[in-house]
Image (spheres, grey):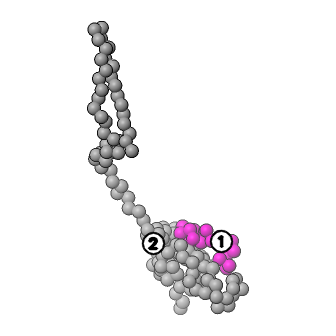
Amino acid sequence: MKILLLLAIVVTHTAFTQTIKLPEPIPLVEQINKLPITYISQTPIKTDKEIVKELIKVKGIQYNVSIPLMNQIVHCESGFNPNLQSMHRYKHSRYAPVGSRELSFGAVQIHLPAHPHITKEQALNPEFAIDFLASNLAKGKGKMWSCYPRG
C-alpha cells in the first residue's frame, strides 16, 4: 500500500500562473524503514521465576524470615512456578473426588480447601503467595508446607 502525498505549488506572478509538481514521494513504509534506530530498551523482560525470586528477597526482608528457607520451600513446592497446580492426586479426601488433582496452586502451593478465604486467583498471584508464605513463616506456621524442613 502506497501512501502518496501529492503536492502542488502554484506560483502566481503578474505575468503568468504556473503549476510546479514535486517528484513522486517515497512511500511512508520505506521512509520509516530508513530511519536510524536510536533507542533500544535496556530493560530486560523478567521471567516468572525471576519475579518469584525477587519477591522472596523483598518479603523475606519485610517479615525478617530466612530467604534461603523461603527459596528452599518454593523450589520444592513449585520450582518457582507461580502458575502451577499441584500434580499430586487425592488418594482420599473430603475436598475433592479421589484421583482428582490436589487443589493447591501457585508458587507456594496454597491448598485452597484449607484456606477458604483465599481465592485461586490470589494463590496464583506471586506477590500474594510469597507474602502469604513469609507472613506464615514469621508466625511460626511453616509446617503447613510439606516442603518445610522437619526436625
Front in this rendered view, residue 52 or 18: 18
Q: Amino acid under label 2?
A: Lys
Q: Sort mark 2 into few (<14), some (14-19) or many (20+) by Cα contacts within 10 Å.
A: some
Residue 69: give x, y in percent of width and height. 48, 80
Q: Amino acid under label 1?
A: Ile
Res 49 label: 2
Q: Sort mark 1 into few (<14), some (14-19) or many (20+) by Cα contacts within 10 Å.
A: some
Front in this rendered view, residue 61 or 108: 108
- Residue 30, relative to residue 12: is it above or below? below
- Residue 43 image-quadrant placement: bottom left
| Majority SS type along the magenta span | helix
Front in this rendered view, residue 2 or 131: 2
**Element under disc 1:** loop
- Residue 28 image-quadrant placement: top left
Picture mark count: 2
Rendered residue at 39%/44% (across/down): 1
- Residue 138, relative to residue 93: is it above or below? above
Rendered residue at 41%/62% (across/down): 45
Q: Is residue 126 magenta?
A: yes
Res 118 label: 1
Q: Mark yes or no: residue 54 visible.
A: no
Rendered residue at 59%/72% (across/down): 123
